[in-house]
Amino acid sequence: MQISRKSDYALRAMVYISAWESDKICSINEISDAEKVPREYLAKILKELSLQGLLHSYKGINGGYRLAKNREDITFLDIIESMQGKIMVNDCIRHSDESGCSKKPQCAMHSFWQAEQERVVKSLGSVNLSSFDYDKYYPFARKKAGKSNPVESVSN
Amino acid sequence: MQISRKSDYALRAMVYISAWESDKICSINEISDAEKVPREYLAKILKELSLQGLLHSYKGINGGYRLAKNREDITFLDIIESMQGKIMVNDCIRHSDESGCSKKPQCAMHSFWQAEQERVVKSLGSVNLSSFDYDKYYPFARKKAGKSNPVESVSN
DNA sequence: TTAATCATGGAGTTAATTCATCCATTTATC
DNA sequence: GATAAATGGATGAATTAACTCCATGATTAA
């Protein structure tokens, strides 16, 4: 696996959104300003995250995005794979469905890569959006939620 | 990190060479035939591995390559990094020398990536060329070693 | 109902990188 | 001196990453 910039942007955006109370809706402009991510590119990314079911989108004035699940239920792996597709550490693994391995039915290194693959997936799957110290890195969030702060109820 | 095809070729070549007795000299043609790696591309790769001090090269008839160190002293990490440069799991880590992190002096995810980085490096550094079951995957090797033993062409 | 503010969708661009190939040259051995 | 190796340089094709631009559509507040 290689974490593309696209994934990095997606992660930053998701972490940013998570920093706020769960009913706060964040616009593309807000996020791109805060995280210094190219606005138009970020738009594509957020749209994709919606399609993948990680975000809910709202159009119109005061529109934007919010998490589609609880923070605990969105892992780094979810976010990264929704940007890059399945994580594959190398071709040996990538081609393992077709020919057992691109080179030999059982190449000498296959089992090593498989283990490495599993380690990485497990590791990325073990971090979720509730794993962060938002108070430390996003002190501005949490306190002031959306400007109008009408109802307390969280989940729609 | 992402294991490029180039690294994969390099690994296969190194593993192939390791399968033989240490004084056996393997030519580009032999390796590319055995491992099904494009001949001209492999030539570049082996040259680079020599420059990096992982192989010794021999010119002239019966020339080719052999390991420049003991099998135990050549890790996957050595081989991969000599092909792709330093392993970096993401931009957050990649830019960490300049500005602490490309985005913020301390971004929320920085420590996670750093840990992930260390895990991967440790893992790749823990496998070396003596880690393989050559008898199983290269039964033809080991038995018949190289014929003659020419003089090194590359000093230093 | 109209203007403002948001997301959506599609097409196109740029630049870099990857993965090579070709061929002429140099070197060593038989 | 013929042969079989590595070396080195130039080049190219294909793919992908990382955007940018802009027109369209939805929503709401005035």
Image: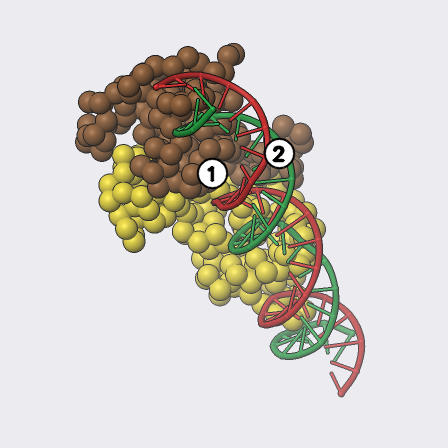
Chain colours: A yellow, B brown, C red, D green
Label annotation for residue A34: none
Mark 2: amino acid: His
Q: Residues under labels 2 and 1: Cα distance?
A: 34 Å
Sequence-wise, the earlier of marks 2 and 1 is 1
| Image x and y of residue B81, in percent | 48, 29
Q: Chain of mark 2?
A: B
Q: Callout 2 environment at 10 Å: few (<14), some (14 to 19), or many (20+)?
A: some
Q: Which residue is mark 1?
A: B40
Q: Same subunit under labels 2 and 1?
A: yes
Q: Residue at x 40, y 31 (%)?
A: B28
For numbered disc 2, what is the local secondary structure? loop
Q: Is residue C19 left or right of residue C13?
A: left
Q: Of residues C7 and A150, which is closer to you in this image? A: C7
Q: Which residue is mark 2?
A: B95
Residue B4 seen by the camera: yes
Mark 1: amino acid: Glu
Q: Are marks 2 and 1 in contact (CB under 8 Å)?
A: no
For numbered disc 1, what is the local secondary structure? helix
Q: Chain of mark 1?
A: B
Q: Is residue A130 left or right of residue A104?
A: right
| Image x and y of residue A155, in percent | 47, 61
Q: Of residues B59 and B82, which is closer to you in this image? A: B59
Front tag of 2 and 1: 1
Q: Residue at x 28, y 19 (%)?
A: B147
Write down the quadrant of residue A65 in the picture: bottom right
**Compared with residue A106, is residue A155 higher up or lower down, i.e. above or below?**
below
